[in-house]
Image (cartoon, rainbow, N blue to C red):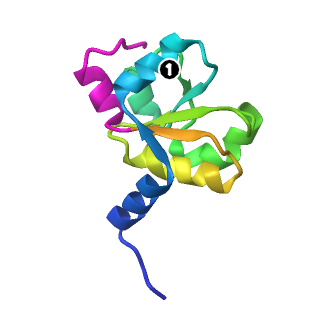
Amino acid sequence: MTYKTAQQLIADAKQQVSEITVHELRELQSGGTPFTLVDVREQNEWNLGHIPGAVYIGRGVLESSVEQRIPRDARVVLYCQSGNRSALAGRTLQEMGYANVSSVAGGWRDWVGTGGEVAD
């Protein structure tokens, strides 16, 4: 059996899950197209601040929580601190039948770094 490193898993996920920039996320927010923004960081990260309008579903409970909260036909945009966990989460959602999934490249770090609004 061939094993993969964490970096290989992340690279594979980023090839399979579309990524959007924080600028594209802002356009999506102002465009009126319905979507669900999901923060997959840890609870303590969420508590320190998050993107307004986001829902919290931590990466560790995503598989067991998402079906009750988000329909499979919804557009889902995921973010984490840097874009790695959200890409992995996106791949998981795809495997669960979610077809319209994106990950925010640069994640929370880029959101805050470009002056994005912060909810607490």
Q: Is 72 included in the stretch rendered in magenta?
A: no
Q: Residue at x 72, y 32 (%)?
A: 69
- 99 or 44: nearer the viewer: 99
> What is the three-letter code of the residue carrying label 1?
Leu
Residue stretch in magenta: 105-120
| Residue denoted by label 1 | 28
Residue 26 is left or right of residue 7, and the answer is right
Q: Residue at x 43, y 41 (%)?
A: 19
Q: Where, quadrant-wise, is the C terminus in this rendering? A: top left
Residue 8, compared with residue 49, is above or below; it is below
Q: Residue at x 53, y 33 (%)?
A: 77
Residue 85, compared with residue 25, is above or below; it is below
Q: Is 117 included in the stretch rendered in magenta?
A: yes
Q: Is residue 51 visible?
A: no
Residue 119: x and y, percent? Answer: 42, 12
- 18 or 115: nearer the viewer: 18
